Amino acid sequence: MDQAVGLRKKENYEMEVHSAIPAAVSALQKPVRVMTVSSGKGGVGKSNVVINLSIALCRMGFRALILDADLGLANIDVLLGLTPKYNMSHVLNGQKKLEDVLIDGPGGVRIMPASSGIQELTRLTDDQKLLFLELLDGLETDIDMLIIDTGAGISDTVLYFNLAANERIIVVTPEPTSLTDAYALIKVLYSRHSERHFRILINSASGEAMGKSIFAKLSKVADHFLDGISLDYLGTIPHDTAVTKSVLQQRPLLEAFPEAPASKAFRQVAETICRSRPNVNQGTIQFFWKRLLNV
Ligand SMILES: Nc1ncnc2c1ncn2[C@@H]1O[C@H](COP(=O)(O)OP(=O)(O)O)[C@@H](O)[C@H]1O
Ligand SMILES: [Mg+2]
């Protein structure tokens, strides 16, 4: 009997140790989730999505870093009333350290303003690429999620970021052109680059029902023409005047109008993101940058 007790104790002990090991290892490796937010057409609400999702994720305890990679006009810093002194190009040319360029935004998010730095990224020499990777190394332990506002369309930069990321969110609105342009973006990533997995976020719909019907349309066309494609419905953000008001106030919606319907929807989407595991292998953030820079 004593022996049996001893055995059980040993089994329990082993079970504890075994279950503790993966947890410890995953805590150490803790891959950073790298996700892009893109769209076929401009002005569909990407930057607002990036900001508010990031804030919602921060509130859930994740450390989110926004990479503003949109070369267009309405940038993340403008939406938040921030005036960054430096951007990624200052890091790339060695004038500034990474920590001097990152901005502490509202709600605990941090922002890496990119502006012209993004175009420079694609033109770096091999030595510069390695230096840049070294500079970014420190970020690995500081963040849990990197959320990239890629801008709209199918430019090389947009494709570049989409291919390097682990997760791709495509924002679509009820406008027919937004749907066809989203399809065009998905099709390019699928046919030229064999990308199969996309998450679709509907913005500015009258409600969930409309959002789901837009998703169904896109999904039907994609399933028909793109064999093996996998589109996931991520959620619907309703059309909400609180969004426009928050933009005018240069404050994030989640802070200015936390109880607005769109705020609630953003919190829900953030929860969906947290619950989901991306269906591709997650690399470290180093892998992301290496893929991006083609090192
Ligand atoms: N859910 C929404 N409800 C109402 N207006 C919205 C919503 N999402 C975006 N908008 C409006 O669309 C404009 C463009 O959004 P923005 O995030 O700058 O788009 P993008 O980054 O795709 O160009 C915002 O200034 C806002 O006025
Ligand atoms: Mg934008």
Image (cartoon, rainbow, N blue to C red):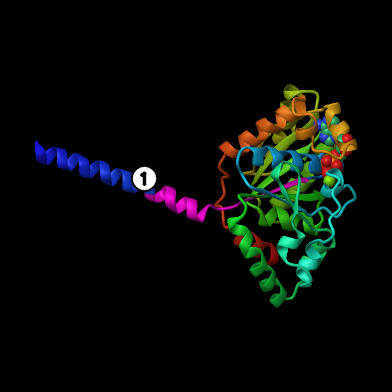
Q: Nearer the viewer, residue 240 or 231?
A: 240
- Can you give x and y, in whole percent of width and height, for residue 94 in the image? 76, 72
Question: Is residue 238 shown above or below 139?
Answer: above
**Residue under pointer 1:** 19
Tell whether position 28 is magenta: yes
Q: Which residues are magenta?
A: 21-38
Q: Is residue 160 left or right of residue 251?
A: left
Q: Residues within 10 Å of mark 1 (few under 14, many from 20)?
A: few
Question: Is residue 144 shown above or below 140?
Answer: above
Report if the beta carbon of the residue with label 1 is closer than 8 angstroms to ligand 1: no
Q: Nearer the viewer, residue 57 or 49?
A: 57
| Residue drawn where x is 87% and y is 37% of the image | 247
- Can you give x and y, in whole percent of width and height, for residue 47 in the image? 80, 43
Looking at the image, the residue that sits furthest to the left is 1
| Residue drawn where x is 66% and y is 64% of the image | 136
Q: Is residue 175 visible?
A: no
Q: Is residue 124 left or right of residue 244?
A: left
> For residue 227, what is the image quadrant?
top right
| Residue drawn where x is 74% and y is 57% of the image | 102
Q: Quadrant of the C terminus?
A: bottom right
Tell whether position 26 is magenta: yes
Question: Is residue 161 shown above or below 57?
Answer: below
Q: Nearer the viewer, residue 209 or 275?
A: 275
- Can you give x and y, in whole percent of width and height, for residue 75 in the image? 85, 49
Q: Nearer the viewer, residue 110 or 178?
A: 110
Q: Which amino acid type corresponds to the residue marked 1 in the rendered image?
A: Ser
| Residue drawn where x is 83% and y is 27% of the image | 240
Question: Is residue 53 shown above or below 91?
Answer: above
- Can you give x and y, in whole percent of width and height, for residue 224 in the image? 69, 38
Q: Looking at the image, in which quadrant does ligand 1 appear?
A: top right
Q: Quadrant of the N terminus?
A: top left
Q: Is residue 190 visible?
A: yes
